[in-house]
Image (spheres, helix red, strand yellow):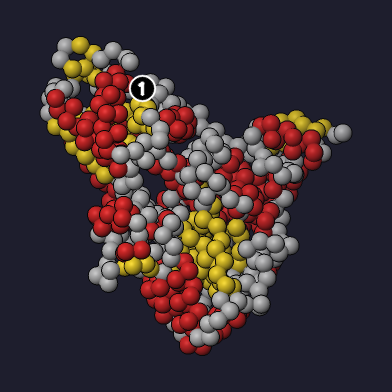
Amino acid sequence: MAKGFVLDPTTAKSDDITSPGPDAGPLAGKVVGVRVDQMWRAWDWISEVWAEEFKKAGAADVKFWRSCGRSGEEGERMAEGLKAFLKEIDIAVVGLANCGSCTGWTVHDALQAAAAGKPTVAIATANFEEFAHTIAKRGGRSGLRVHVLPYPLNEKFREEVDPVANAHFPRLLATMGAEIGKGKQAAA
Amino acid sequence: MSIVTIAPSHAKLKAPPKQLVSRDCGPDGCEIDWLASARHEVELDVVSFTQFAMDQGWGDGLPLVPPTDARVRGMLAVNNRFPDEVIAYLPPMRAECTVEKIVINAVMAGAPPESLPLLIAAVEAFGEPDFELYGMNATTASVSPAVFVNGPIRNKLNIPYKHGCFGGAASPAAAIGRALRLIMRNVAGQVVGVTSQSTFGSPARVSGMVVAEWEERSPWAPLAERRAGVKGDAVTTFGGMGTMNILDTTSQTATEFLEMIGRSAAYVGTNGFSPAVPFCEVFVAINPICAEIVGKEMKNIDDVQEVLWKNASLPADWFTPKHLEQLEDQQRIRADGRVYLTPEPKDVVVMVCGGTGGLHAAVVHSFGTSITQTVAIV
């Protein structure tokens, strides 16, 4: 059979930032920004629990920003809103990667936060962990920190979700490289 | 939140001009190697090459035509296009989609050389931020971009608009659609189970969905002209979730037909009714027999869209309590106690196509937050 050459149909992005970015460091006096969405009530519940925990850990404030439609005028409002939000916060907690498109946009917004120099962690459920890392790498930052929550999650009732939030908070701090008081959280 | 209307963003994404190769001689005029892609030495028969391509992750499981220099150069030459022109940045990879990459994938798919202008217009439309390809390529949904074609190019390329136009008509449309799907895989980086989380997928993710409008049988202006003022050759791209068939052997009047179609399109599990989706469009294909009846009563397409829109709605108490609670929180229940599939009548995208057997309409539901794009084919 004849041999010959064919042209490669693929493209590749070569630029990649493998660093996780700066640690969150001491929480005292800092403003933690939590990105929520309009899809996952479980993520709203977890965010509420974590907001209280961040305050107990010394955070000066916890601010929320809700992602909605990402196209058209609505998308422009969202893009501007995210930019403004990132200026108001010191640390970004970005969720929730719990489906295809929402993992895409969670990582997208986390990459925006990381690019703005904020200590950033994306929150994914276990089923979408690998996808979140893949999307982050394709977005040019494979080092993005990802904290993983159990899956399935949104199908659970609040009384089941709150304990998950509490159990994961110390591990979240470890992923973020956050410090309470004098000591840095040991990785779980 | 409240009802979010669909309005295009103000910023249009235009790929910056970038020249990689000399323009000293044209695509059909010299032997300069201006193709930038890596080359692989392979067995050139279709079976061997298809296996090689599958091993590389380039393929979709169907036989592939080897994209040799001669075939790629030939397609460029027929269209007098340079290979280095960047048409779009396609997510999730956000890598450059050049004319060269479009041609290589088109050759592999078996698309005719004359389809290159259509492919370029479609890729340009896909790359518009308002099309929201980022979410579409990643989602768990089964969405795939549909391409609706207007203008004389319909006949030049034999894009179907009569019997079996959404699938089954012997036509290059499937190869053209497949070329767009290979571009999505190899350039955008949409790979099932890796960057695409689609739970079920759909046949349109292999062959695409490339359909033309039967303009000669439409009582209204062509779709592209109505949407964007584009006369002649154009593509309109729509984030479609697959076709839904609606049979109506009973209706006789325009209003009756449109009520039947509108009510059928309104089912609770479609993305447009999800509390997770701020807005949706919906596509309605009306067959030429029905279009004639509707057109006699409704000369203005706005009236058609209005009736479809009003009927593509559900009473709030039709939703389950938890869904209803979320919809109430989002203030999506209107004063008449109903939830509407799309924000406004203009968001119902209507086109005439299909066989003369009539009886059926086709609805394609939208992924949501993807705004339909119309681009002229030049």
- What is the crowding at mark 1: few (fewer than 14 residues within 10 Å), some, or many (at least 20)? some
Q: Quadrant of residue B50?
A: top right
* Residue A20 percent across, percent down from the top left: 36, 22
- Above or below residue B36? Residue B374 is below
User: Which quadrant would the N terminus of chain A be assigned to in this image?
Assistant: top right
Q: Residue at x 29, y 24 (%)?
A: A168
Q: Residue at x 62, y 45 (%)?
A: B182
- Residue designated by label 1: A20
Amino acid of disc 1: Pro
Q: Left of B192 or right of it: where is B70? A: right
Q: Left of B120 or right of it: where is B72? A: right
Q: Residue at x 44, y 46 (%)?
A: B135
Depth check, front residue: A35 or B104:
A35
Q: Residue at x 65, y 66 (%)?
A: B165
User: Which quadrant would the C terminus of chain A be assigned to in this image?
Assistant: top left
Q: Quadrant of residue A35?
A: top left
* Residue B275 percent across, percent down from the top left: 34, 53
- Above or below residue A20? Residue B174 is below
Furthest toward the bottom, the residue is: B296
* Residue A24 percent across, percent down from the top left: 25, 22
Depth check, front residue: B4 or B103:
B4
Mark 1 lies on a secondary structure that is loop
Q: Left of B213 or right of it: where is A63? A: left
Q: Left of B204 or right of it: where is B64? A: right
Chain that bears disc 1? A
- Above or below residue B232? Residue A145 is above
Answer yes or no: is residue B340 visible.
no
- Above or below residue B230? Residue B73 is above
Q: Tally the marks.
A: 1
* Residue B131 percent across, percent down from the top left: 45, 53
Answer yes or no: is residue A171 visible.
yes
